[in-house]
Amino acid sequence: MTSVTEKRPVNRVRHSVLAGQAALTALGSYVLVESLRLGLWNDLGPGPGFFPCVLGGGLVLLSLIWFVQERAGVQSAAAPEAADGSQVRAVVLSLLVLAAALPFIGFQAGVFLFLMYHLRLRARTSWIKSLAVSLCGSVGVYYLFTLALRVSLPEATIIPLNLIGL
């Protein structure tokens, strides 16, 4: 038999989770509605509301999935992870290096090196997985944005890289 004092913290956690889900759903809905007013597409490609619409819709969808999982009892209580400051510093520093290097080495080479660093050196995944994800994440995303969405991404200004199409 559980006492009343044991139920209060559980109810407080349930209410805070429910409030978080409602807040994220409301925020995603607001972003979704406002992005539609901006316009999703124009003559040049994706309009100013395209990416906010995708992000708002994704936030609503993920919040609803979280709600359903929470109600079904799918969520397991995972042990809290210790904060790893070195991982955070590595990601932030490598993002700053990537942003500084993009005008010189271009999107494809820059994102490929960024992903290889994080997958192979930091996460220690296999060479095959690291190469496959890095190629899809750099070359695949580059062509998706440039050909399908007609969005220009930085190209290399260093002559040898520019000559081979990076």
Image (tube, rainbow, N blue to C red):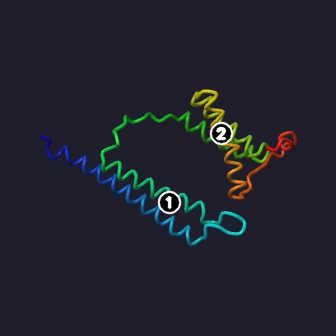
What amino acid is at disc 1? Gly
Q: Do the numbered discs 2 and 1 sit on residues whose CB atoms are within 8 Å? A: no
Which is more toward the observer, 78 or 36? Answer: 36
At 86% from the left and 39% from the top, the residue drawn is: 160
Which is more toward the observer, 85 or 78? Answer: 78
Image quadrant for the N terminus? top left
Which class describes the residues within 10 Å of circle 1: few (<14), some (14-19), or many (20+)? Answer: some
Find disc 2 in the rendering and name its residue: 94
Tell me how many marks there are: 2
Which class describes the residues within 10 Å of circle 2: few (<14), some (14-19), or many (20+)? Answer: some
Residue 57's disc is 1
At 39% from the left and 36% from the top, the residue drawn is: 80
Q: In this view, does 51 lie to the left or right of 98?
A: left
**Residue 161 in the image, given as x and y percentages of width and height:** 83, 40
**Residue 2 in the image, given as x and y percentages of width and height:** 14, 42
Looking at the image, residue 89 lies above or below residue 145: above
Image quadrant for the C terminus? top right
Looking at the image, residue 55 lies above or below residue 112: below
Residue furthest toward the left? Answer: 1
Q: Nearer the viewer, mark 2 or mark 1?
A: 1
What amino acid is at disc 2? Ser
Looking at the image, residue 108 lies above or below residue 62: above
Q: Is residue 151 left or right of residue 59?
A: right
Q: In this view, does 159 lie to the left or right of 14?
A: right
